[in-house]
């Protein structure tokens, strides 16, 4: 989805449905999208992660 948010690769959704419910696929997609947003945001602003040290 990062490279082309308009569509998944052929067969990707069908493969996911073999292992996950539709609700789980939605939740996984959201978690990955938020992680991607966070990484891009932090990279763009050159934010160093807080490792809690």
Image (cartoon, rainbow, N blue to C red):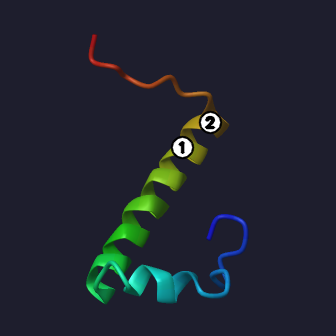
- 40 vs 51, left or right, is right
Query: Where is residue 10 drawn, in percent x and y?
Result: 66, 87
Q: Which residue is mark 2?
A: 43
Please, what secondary structure does the residue beneath circle 1 have?
A: helix
Foreground: 6 or 46? Answer: 6
- 46 vs 37, left or right, is right
Q: Is residue 3 above or below residue 26?
A: above
Query: Where is residue 44 drawn, in percent x and y?
Result: 66, 39
Foreground: 13 or 49? Answer: 13
- The C terminus - image quarter: top left
Query: Where is residue 20 drawn, in percent x and y?
Result: 31, 79
Q: Is residue 47 above or below residue 42?
A: above
Which residue does the image show at 60% across and 87% down from the upper left? Answer: 11
Tell me if label 2 and label 1 are in contact, CB under 8 Å: yes
**Which numbered circle lies on residue 31?**
none
Q: Residue furthest top?
A: 53
Q: CA distance from mark 2 to mark 1?
A: 6 Å
Q: Is residue 47 above or below residue 30?
A: above
- The N terminus - image quarter: bottom right
- 16 vs 8, left or right, is left
Which residue does the image show at 63% across and 81% down from the upper left? Answer: 8
Q: Residue furthest right?
A: 3
Query: Where is residue 42 drawn, in percent x and y?
Result: 55, 37
Which residue does the image show at 37% across and 22% down from the upper left? Answer: 50
Q: Which residue is mark 1?
A: 39
Q: Residues within 10 Å of mark 1 (few under 14, many from 20)?
A: some
């Amino acid at each position: 989805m990062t490279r082309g948010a308009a569509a998944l690769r052929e067969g990707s959704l069908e493969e996911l449905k073999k292992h996950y419910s539709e609700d789980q696929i939605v939740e996984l997609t959201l978690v990955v999208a938020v992680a991607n947003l966070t990484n891009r945001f932090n990279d763009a602003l050159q934010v160093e992660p807080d490792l809690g040290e």
